[in-house]
Amino acid sequence: MNILILGSGGREHSLAWAVKQNPKCDRLIIAPGNAGIAEIAECASLDIERGSAVVDFASAQSIDFVIVGPEAPLAAGVADAVRAAGILCFGPSKEAARLEASKSFTKEICDAAGAPTAAYARFTEAAPAKAYIRAQGAPIVIKADGLAAGKGVIVAMEEATALEAVDDMLGGAFGEAGAEVVIEEFMEGEEASYFLLTDGKTVLPVGTAQDHKRAYDGDAGPNTGGMGAYSPAPVLSDEVAQRALTEIVQPCVDEMARRGTPYQGVLYAGLMIQDGAPRLVEYNVRFGDPECQVLMMRLGAQALDLMQACAEGRLHEMPVHWAEDHAITVVMAAKGYPGAYEKGSTIRGLDALPEDSKNMVFHAGTTEVDGQITATGGRVLNITARGDTLSEARDRAYAMIDQIDWPEGFNRSDIGWRAL
Ligand code: AMP
Ligand code: GLY
């Protein structure tokens, strides 16, 4: 099978790593890829948000299966274009990808499905939005409806912050994405992520994870895309996970099918868990980054069989062989991230590190310049390890970090603390 994976981050490196271990995989191309991915597969430059460009490339390269990593191509309808060209594709249609691309759409689906989530109201005008905030009081959560690169959510502990957020969003701070705002009840509890594949009918859980969103130790500092993650998430016990499946995810998947827009791909359910009861915070229509890295570490080669069965609508045939162990990933980022940071520094010491089923360095933002691995992004490397216990996995990951020589980078030293 010739496989094309779209994307360029640590998520896509881990997908490529897992897929490549499967004997079914003949040729593997990642577009656009990065320096780490180039060590295990072919990379190609391609405008991955343009369906026709992806279809032309896939046809020319005799690609049998396209796996879409990030949300932007999905929201742009790339999976629709690939399927329309008769090529198998893992990832939801543009219409189904609204589960991430529109927060008010997700609320509508939850309402119709009876799935527990925060109470909410939606607005396009500032005056009624502010009146609603004053009536509800803080804490309260203000969200831009559309995709805002992870920056469109303000958890306001004070009423003034909430009022200001409404002015910012409706005033155009996020462009079209903020033309409508969703104002939500503040939910208390512990957050965890649940990853499920669905072919539109069958829903198959493939793992749980928790991430660390703040930049610095002790969950301090600014919000980031995620500074580390681990799997499994202890708070998502079998019982809580079963409730999340039957009360939230399956009813939403059924509602999408009922509307004639079945969801096919991975659903990443962000959950808030309080007293054993899960509520939906949000859906993403892709694997999390860096959560994917820990899931792939634990799933290995079967990830390809599962994604293929998902795309072919025969997920009901598939068992998942759950690893009993733990995985962790620690993000190394460029100093300054998530604010301004330098690009172009050299990373040394990677060659000496083990790369096997227990230890992997996934690249997120790297390129090769004159034979040297060079940092090109904010989040740059994902140091990933497995172990029989989380603390064993953590020790392995930090032992690898000790061998990496990159003075311009930093990482948190406490990934996994909540579960440890
Ligand atoms: P989102 O982009 O929807 O994942 O939101 C970013 C983060 O904001 C989430 O991971 C939560 O930590 C927080 N958040 C979002 N919605 C709520 C809510 N209704 N109550 C409490 N926290 C929330
Ligand atoms: N790590 C969070 C995300 O991928 O959205």
Image (cartoon, rainbow, N blue to C red):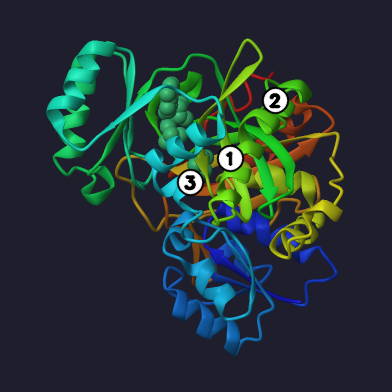
Q: Which circle's residue, 2 or 3, is located before the other in the chain?
A: 3
Left or right: where 81 falls relative to 64: left
Left or right: where 369 falls relative to 172: right
Out of 144 and 396, give the one closest to the viewer.
144
Q: CA distance from mark 2 to mark 3?
A: 20 Å
- On the image, the x and y values in percent for residue 78 come to 49, 68
Q: Which circle's residue, 1 or 3, is located before the other in the chain?
A: 3
Q: Which circle's residue, 1 or 2, is located before the other in the chain?
A: 2
Left or right: where 246 falls relative to 101: right
- On the image, the x and y values in percent for residue 265 come to 63, 55
Which label sits on residue 243? 2
At mark 1, the secondary structure is: helix
The three-letter code of the residue at mark 1 reads Cys
Judging by the rendered image, the residue that carries numbered circle 3 is 99
| Mark 1 in CB contact with mark 3 (< 8 angstroms) | yes
Screen quadrant of the C terminus: top right
Out of 343 and 256, give the one closest to the viewer.
256
Left or right: where 10 falls relative to 346: right
| Mark 1 in CB contact with mark 2 (< 8 angstroms) | no
Which label sits on residue 197? none
Screen quadrant of the N terminus: bottom right
- Above/below status of 172 relative to 217: below
Q: CA distance from mark 1 to mark 2?
A: 13 Å
The three-letter code of the residue at mark 2 reads Arg
Q: Quadrant of residue 57?
A: bottom right
- Residue at coordinates 79% horizontally, 59% vertically from top-left? 314
At mark 3, the secondary structure is: helix
